[in-house]
């Protein structure tokens, strides 16, 4: 693998992409390189069958997963059986939904009935749930085919992914580099075309960090928009579940499927769900964009700064205004997630501490030292912040900044310069989209965030920027 070589799928340049953000994918002879939207359209028009799509992805998994280690479990037989069943349903005129016959994969902390869900931990290495997580149920009902379960930072408790019982995940753009976490497996699988879409979880940036490092789209919805029921928790108060995809349009399609109230999940809120795909083409000319310079642009790698400033320059021509703003500082999320993580794991920590990775074990033990009064005050501050933050958006509609202050570091190095946790704290919708590459060939991410329940507005600007560029269509050269 040569991290300095890119392949822009298809012969067209940015001009063609401005008309169709997925056009570069269409020119590829390998169906696995298609976007989720293209795969779904191909099934509906009978240009490709669910079996053909599943087989295309499985071939790539066979060829590349050994080097990437993105999958923990590959459900080959079940995926092909489901593909044949969905193909038969189509012949009979039955249509399940927007993902009918489209192969996806799930982060391995999302429960799947009859299929082990490990959290990338020895603690759960043989755990087989009897029920699907709510998001898995909705995806199945929409016709998705499950290819398998994807690797992650153990128990989603970290921003890398080498800390896992099943071995480190490798960044497709540079095998010696990490790909971010905790949803590292989904990001690597998408960048390498090992599935058409995935679902990750985000407590402090775990969808957006790997999205930035791997050059794919990672979207975190408003807290309460998507059910967390059936997801191994890190923090009940901060966990978000959201789509990880190749394009913004694909993310909107997946959010349409998984969003909505779940009476059995106390975190979800009964707020009407928009049609996010319809909202993609909402005009952006009236949008007011804020640039939170402090501290989000402090100590940023020069190449990241240039890519993001170039993106802001393009966005300036798409919206009503772009101005520097002072965004309120968040509290200390670790004071909330730490005690909640410890509360969930206390019984196993006491009985079988040896089943945790050493880094995870040490961190959860440190969490036990957070006092109840510190936790209670932090939780209270967070709840108040979530109630009051929307007043900030009376003067701007969206915020734009780097997702990460640097590119993916080598495996074993710490992740630094994170611009993501504050949006989990406030529970705001936020997306990371590709906006460039470093001279070493590593992806750079742009983060766009908005007010509560304004996912459609976030999507609209992200989609407009994506249509004007070709960063999302570049793929690593895999050998």
Image (cartoon, helix red, strand yellow):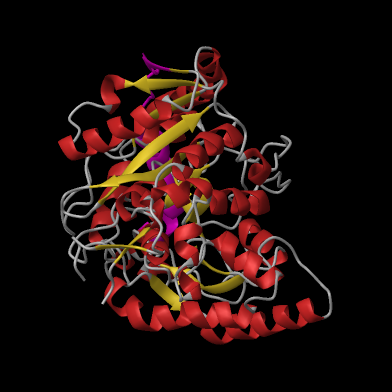
Q: Position of residue 422 (x, y in %)?
A: 40, 30
Q: Give the quarter of the figure containing the N terminus.
A: bottom left
> x and y percent of residue 320 in the render?
50, 18
Which quadrant: the C terminus? bottom left
Q: Does residue 397 sit above or below 375 in this rendering? A: above
- Residue 154 position by quadrant: bottom left
State the extent of the magenta-drawn residues as a range: 322-350
Residue 303 visible in this rendered orientation of the protein? yes
Residue at image position (45%, 44%) is: 466
Q: Can residue 405 be seen at all in this image of the molecule?
A: no
In the depicted view, which residue is nearer to us: 290 or 202? 290
Residue 296 vs residue 4, the one in the foreground: 4
Which of the 4 image quarters holds residue 59? bottom left
- The percent position of residue 368, horizontal first and vertical second, equals 34, 43
Please indicate whether residue 123 sits to the left or right of residue 221 in the image: left
Q: Is residue 92 magenta?
A: no
For the point 48% across and 73% down, the residue is 32
Taking depth in this image into account, of 422 and 39 the one nearest to the observer is 39
| Residue 215 locus on image (x, y percent) | 35, 53
Q: Is residue 359 left or right of residue 109?
A: left
Q: Residue at x 64, y 76 (%)?
A: 47
Q: Residue at x 28, y 54 (%)?
A: 160
Q: How many marks?
A: 0
Task: Look at the picture and state if 41 lies above or below 396.
Answer: below
Compared with 404, 153 (above or below) is: below
């Amino acid at each position: 693998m040569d991290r300095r070589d890119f392949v822009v799928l298809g012969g067209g340049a940015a001009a063609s992409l401005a008309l169709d953000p997925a056009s570069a994918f269409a020119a590829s002879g390998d169906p696995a390189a298609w976007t989720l939207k293209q795969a779904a359209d191909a099934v509906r028009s009978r240009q490709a069958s669910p079996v053909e799509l599943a087989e295309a992805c499985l071939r790539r998994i066979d060829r590349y997963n050994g080097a990437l280690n993105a999958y923990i479990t590959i459900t080959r037989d079940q995926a092909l059986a489901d593909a044949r069943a969905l193909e038969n349903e189509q012949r009979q005129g039955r249509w399940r939904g927007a993902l009918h016959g489209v192969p996806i994969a799930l982060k391995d902390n999302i429960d799947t009935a009859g299929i082990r869900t490990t959290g990338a931990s020895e603690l759960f290495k043989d755990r087989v749930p009897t029920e699907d997580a709510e998001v898995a149920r909705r995806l199945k009902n929409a016709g998705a085919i499950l290819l398998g379960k994807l690797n992650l930072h153990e128990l989603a408790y970290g921003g890398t992914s080498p800390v896992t019982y099943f071995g480190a995940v490798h960044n497709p753009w540079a095998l010696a580099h990490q790909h971010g976490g905790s949803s590292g497996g989904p990001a690597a699988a998408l960048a390498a075309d090992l599935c058409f879409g995935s679902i990750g979880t985000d407590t402090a940036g775990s969808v957006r960090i790997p999205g930035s490092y791997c050059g794919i789209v990672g979207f975190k919805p408003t807290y309460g928009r998507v059910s967390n029921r059936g997801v191994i928790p890190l923090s009940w108060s901060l966990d978000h579940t959201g789509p990880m995809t190749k394009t913004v349009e694909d993310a909107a399609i997946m959010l349409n499927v998984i969003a909505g109230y779940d009476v059995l999940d106390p975190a979800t809120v009964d707020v009407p769900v928009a049609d996010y795909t319809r909202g993609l083409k909402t005009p952006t000319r009236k949008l007011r964009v804020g640039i939170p310079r402090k501290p989000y642009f402090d100590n940023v790698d020069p190449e990241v700064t240039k890519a993001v400033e170039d993106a802001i320059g393009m966005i300036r021509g798409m919206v009503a205004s772009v101005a520097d703003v002072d965004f309120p500082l968040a509290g200390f999320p670790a004071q909330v997630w730490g005690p909640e993580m410890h509360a969930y794991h206390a019984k196993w920590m006491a009985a079988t501490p040896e089943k945790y990775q050493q880094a995870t074990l040490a961190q959860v033990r440190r969490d036990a030292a957070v006092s109840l009064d510190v936790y209670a005050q932090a939780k209270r501050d967070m709840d108040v912040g979530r109630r009051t933050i929307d007043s900030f958006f009376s003067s701007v509609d969206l915020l734009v900044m780097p997702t990460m202050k640097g590119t993916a570091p080598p495996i074993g190095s710490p992740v630094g310069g994170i611009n993501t946790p504050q949006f989990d704290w406030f529970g705001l919708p936020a997306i990371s989209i590709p906006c460039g590459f470093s001279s070493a060939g590593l992806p750079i991410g742009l983060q766009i965030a908005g007010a509560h329940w304004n996912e459609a507005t976030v999507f609209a600007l992200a989609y407009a920027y994506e249509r004007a560029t070709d960063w999302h269509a570049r793929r690593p050269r895999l050998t």
